[in-house]
Image (cartoon, helix red, strand yellow):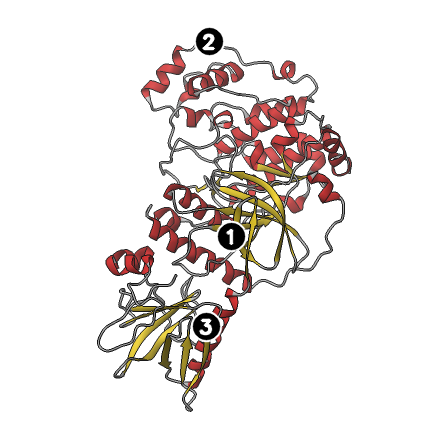
Amino acid sequence: MMRRSTLKDMLMRTGSTRDVSKSAAGSGGADGAAGGSEGGGEESTGASGGAASSAAAAAAADPAAATADGGKASSSSSDPVSGGFPPGVDMQGFLSKKGNLQWKARWFELHGNVLYYYKSKEDNTVRGMLELDQSSTVAALGGDGKALQVIVAGGRALKVSAETEAECELWKLHIRSAIESLGSIQKITVNNQSFEIDKRYSVNRKIGAGAYGMVVSAVDEKTGKRVAIKKVKGAFDDTTDAKRILREIRLMRVMNHSNILSLVNIIKPISLEHFEDVYIITELMSTDLQQIIFSKTPLNEDQTQWILYQCLCGLQYLHSASILHRDLKPSNLLVDIETCDVRICDFGLSRGEVNGGTKTDYVVTRWYRAPEIMLAYTHYDYAIDLWSMGCIFGELLSRRPLLPGKDYIDQLKLIVKLVGSPSEDDLWFVTNRNAKNFISMLPHSEAQDFKAKFPSAPDSAIDLLTRLLTLDPAKRIDVGHAIEHPYLEAVREPRLESLAGFKVDASDVEATQLKKTHLQRKMFEEICSFHDDMKKRPPEPVVAPVEGAAEDAQS
């Protein structure tokens, strides 16, 4: 179809294409191993013989927090053969540990490349730890097949014995796997920024940067696919931003729709103790809708319909999963110039819809912010995303921002000038007295004639735009009816109108305290859960990289 064959050529003539991928909150736009000793004659298993690492020390100092969010994980299964371990725990169970004088039963947990032990399964105080490195070795100890020895850099050794040979073999398997995984990480530098990522990714170049860190394009050598790798440097320095990243990862983990940016991978941290940066890998897109709009290259009617339709299909999927995006704007709508396909991205502000729940009013970039949010209504719902889509649709038609307010007051004035002064009934949702007084004091304004404002738009487009930009959220068109609107009839594809079939539960994410250790633990568990999910999926097909076209789009 025309929409899929001409967009690239049109954009190439204006030199307005670029690789774009956003996958973490705050993604731009306007907006030495330590060790511990138990005492009692047991040998130190750490590389330095000092206290346990900062996270382990925090867990020891705050057992309550440790069990809630930031410390030793628990599991209903203690059988190392059957598995069923908590997220972030690769192996756990009782082992007899050899001290200077005797063997003692201890509860062991392997987290990435760090082996912790406790006095008992219920104990929340880390008694000691052993940090594995690439030179570490694990081997059988004795002749009964139940004991093993782990040696790390510096010659320190841990000697333990399992109840059965099968348990011992499983421990050796997991420990060897942890050691081998350390060798799969490469350290590279791009524009003076260090990246520690899996060797399967061959980095091409930097494609974006901001306060959050840097994005680079790369090729996944295992699949041949081009991806975007975002490094969020010091992800836990700002706990509010960290929670947004955590929220986004949770949502992207479970979403599966053609019009929502796909989460390809998240680099698994070597250990919780050294977990500071987050690496999020997504599919690579050519550009975003903001760049297309700013290019001033005219879009034909078919392309405009196709872009809007896909945005609405992705939004319908989100809403069916009980998710409000809350930050829809052109820069968060990625576009593939080869196909004109659209992906919604940036879910750091997205929240689950809770009936009757109070929500924050500081969401959505001002120009795309719904009037109910501007007027301090805290029980807003999915309708806020439809207002944002109306603003974006108007921008597609006019090639300029529809409501570019300079500040909060100016934004409200522009809204009233566009859609007209509201009636008393239209303001049913305004409970803030100051907000209601402000609106009532504005000069009376008639709604603008959209046909005159968008002279080249067909009547059906004007009708849909009017329904999207209805001030009363209860009267605003919902996403399902917007998709069914006659304006989009010619471009509808049933495969894109699929619903999620589930409701996303992120209550545990929202309940996570804004403390660094708690967020580190929760993020670590979330990433480990993602990798557990990936193991259950069939292998990705290997594709031959497209020569020329994608690279031309970057030039």
Residue 368 at x, y percent in the picture: 51, 27
Is the C terminus in the top left, top right, bottom left or bottom right quadrant? top right
Instruction: Identify the residue shown where x is 50% and y is 44%.
Output: 24
Which residue appears farthest toward the front when viewing the image?
154
In the picture, measured across the screen, residue 466 lies left or right of residue 411, that is right
Question: Between 52 and 547, which is closer to the camera in this rendering?
Answer: 52
- Name the residue carrying label 1: 253
Mark 2 or 1, which is nearer the eye?
1
- Name the residue carrying label 2: 444
Residue type at mark 2: give it: His
Residue type at mark 3: give it: Ser
Label 2 CA crowd tier, 10 Å (few <14, some 14–19, many 20+)? few
Work out whether 91 lies above or below 241.
Answer: below
Work out whether 451 lies above or below 372.
Answer: above
Question: Helix, strand or loop at disc 2?
Answer: loop
Residue 276 at x, y percent in the picture: 42, 51
In the picture, measured across the screen, residue 204 lies left or right of residue 326, that is right
- Name the residue carrying label 3: 136
Label 3 CA crowd tier, 10 Å (few <14, some 14–19, many 20+)? many
Instruction: Identify the residue shown where x is 66% and y is 31%.
Output: 292
